[in-house]
Amino acid sequence: MSFNLDRVIAVRTNKTVYRDGDKAIKVFDKDYKKADVLNEALNQARIEETGLNIPKILEVSLVEDGKWAIVSEYIPGKTLDRLMAENPDKYDEYLELFVDLQIKVHSMKSPLLNKLKDKMNRKISEADLDATTRYELHTRLEGMPKHNKVCHGDFNPSNIIISEDGTPYILDWSHATQGNASADVARTYLLFWLNGDMTGADKYLDLFCKKSDTAKQYIQKWLPIVAASQSVKGNPKEREFLLSWVNVVEYE
């Protein structure tokens, strides 16, 4: 099927998102693995089944020059990070909405999603770390409580769209897994840091722990594991920053 790819709405590493009427078309670069595109579409379809507010997937197809695309509903509205920037006086209110949404995601189950623990073990093995550190991280991960909650994997305010009628929609399920929700929280905390918002990171963590009755120390235990597994992708500066977190929390 042919789409009108004149209107760019977002540019990400290895992909560009276009709007064509009521459709959002995410076009992947030519060298992007077909299996990864299909896995992302499958994740999105599985999350749809939970009943969470997400843009519905409409099709997966080949577009120009043999590039793959995922076509979803286009949700008109503003991202939560844009609203936070435009209305700084409402920051705390938006942060509360953000945390409530994440807690709702974690309340879901999707038994066929990939397991977070398997993914992290694989990523730690690929990380640019010495064998001793990798062993410590694998051991720590092995000792963490095993849960099967839906985890978004990239939960940040730019992945939340507030539609024109005020309904929040959660975008980008390419990293979705099932596992321990505190790993997902550690990832979000690091994303605030990567964005240069250390104050937001601390506010977020305090609010999440309060609302979900989770000990902050428990999430901090996940930080080295999550930082190491995330360091595998991303630019060198980001990688260096994430690897600096690997030894932040002393091993017990």
Image (spheres, rainbow, N blue to C red):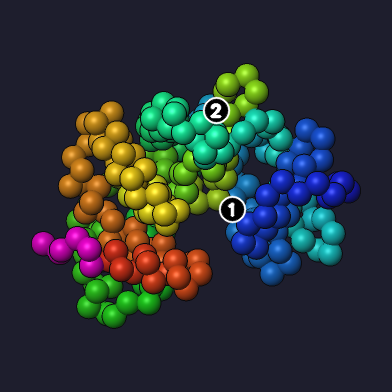
Q: Look at the picture and state if 238 lies above or below 192.
A: below
Residue 121 visible from this viewpoint: no
Q: Which residue is drawn at 28% across and 28% down?
A: 211
Question: Magenta-highlighted stretch: main secondary structure?
Answer: loop
Q: Name the residue under label 2.
A: 168
Q: What stretch is highlighted in magenta?
A: 247-252
Residue 248 within the magenta-colored segment of the rendering: yes
Q: Which residue is drawn at 62% across and 61% down?
A: 13
Residue 212 within the magenta-colored segment of the rendering: no
**Residue 35, picture quadrant:** bottom right
Residue 229, which numbered label? Answer: none
As rendered, which of 210 and 233 lies closer to the eye? Answer: 210
User: Mark 1 vs mark 2: which is more N-terminal?
Assistant: 1
**Label 2: element kind:** strand
**Extreme bottom residue here?**
130
* Residue 235 on image: x %, y %: 51, 69
* Residue 178 on image: x %, y %: 40, 45
| Amino acid type for the residue under numbered disc 1 | Asn
The residue mark sitting in front, 1 or 2, is 2
Judge from the rendering whether residue 225 lies leftward or rightward of residue 118; answer left or right: left
As rendered, which of 7 and 169 lies closer to the eye? Answer: 7
**Extreme top residue here?**
165
Q: Residue at x 83, y 50 (%)?
A: 5
Judge from the rendering whether residue 58 lies leftward or rightward of residue 140; answer left or right: right
Q: Mark 1 points at which residue?
A: 39
| Amino acid type for the residue under numbered disc 2 | Pro
